[in-house]
Amino acid sequence: MSSARIVSFRGIVASPRIGGVSTANYNFSSIFNVVGSGVLVAVRRLTAQVDSLSTTFGRIFAAHMVTVAPTGGTLHAPMALDTTLTHNASVEFRSAASDDGVITALASAAGSVAWQQVAPKGASSYGQVLSDDNPVFPMLVEFDPVVLREGEGVLVRMAVGPSSSADHIINCMFEEFTYASVPGEQVASFMII
């Protein structure tokens, strides 16, 4: 017997605009696989967008692995990339902003830092600078994803360089899956005499 990966959901989700904050180690968003979900979560892409007017400094986003579900913030429903698949509500994506742009604190203790990414600073205080996607995880996870088991998650927080002159959006692409046993190939065994 061997095992086959059965994808039960494939989706994308984005935080609304998270207005500028000036607090160090501010929690922006999280994806968490709640205990009892019955699925594994493969995070294939996790990025930050920054609309920056600051010319003083860049921003450093940090991805922390967490084992306690974040609370507060706003829970966001993902969009299915295949509408025949169903999202498991025990896989939660939260952010510190709601759809009306109001900041609601996302509470979570930071775990081990898995990856950090610097977002560029503005070129001038007169021009708006929209950056490319800033990978919160290395781009390699698109091919070899970070797998979250039940009771595991990722917290995205601003590690250094918060500013009230920038807006932020966190985007996530993920899959929910399980493994199923499938009959393997039979291998003939024989002896040569």
Image: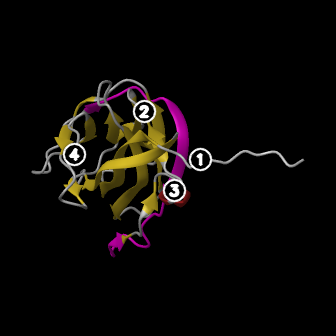
Residue 87 — which label? 4
Label 1 to label 2: alpha-carbon separation = 32 Å
The residue that disc 1 covers is: 186
Measuring from the top left, give residue 3's x and y in whole percent: 48, 42
Q: Going from the N terminus, do you reach mark 1 or mark 2 first?
A: 2
In the current view of this chain or complex, which residue is farthest to the front? Answer: 193
Q: Which residues are magenta?
A: 106-129
Amino acid carrying label 3: it is Val
The residue that disc 3 covers is: 118
Amino acid carrying label 1: it is Gln
Q: Going from the N terminus, do you reach mark 4 or mark 3 first?
A: 4
Label 3 to label 1: alpha-carbon separation = 51 Å
The residue that disc 2 covers is: 149
Q: Residue at x 41, y 65 (%)?
A: 133
Q: Quadrant of residue 125?
A: bottom left
Q: Quadrant of residue 110?
A: top left
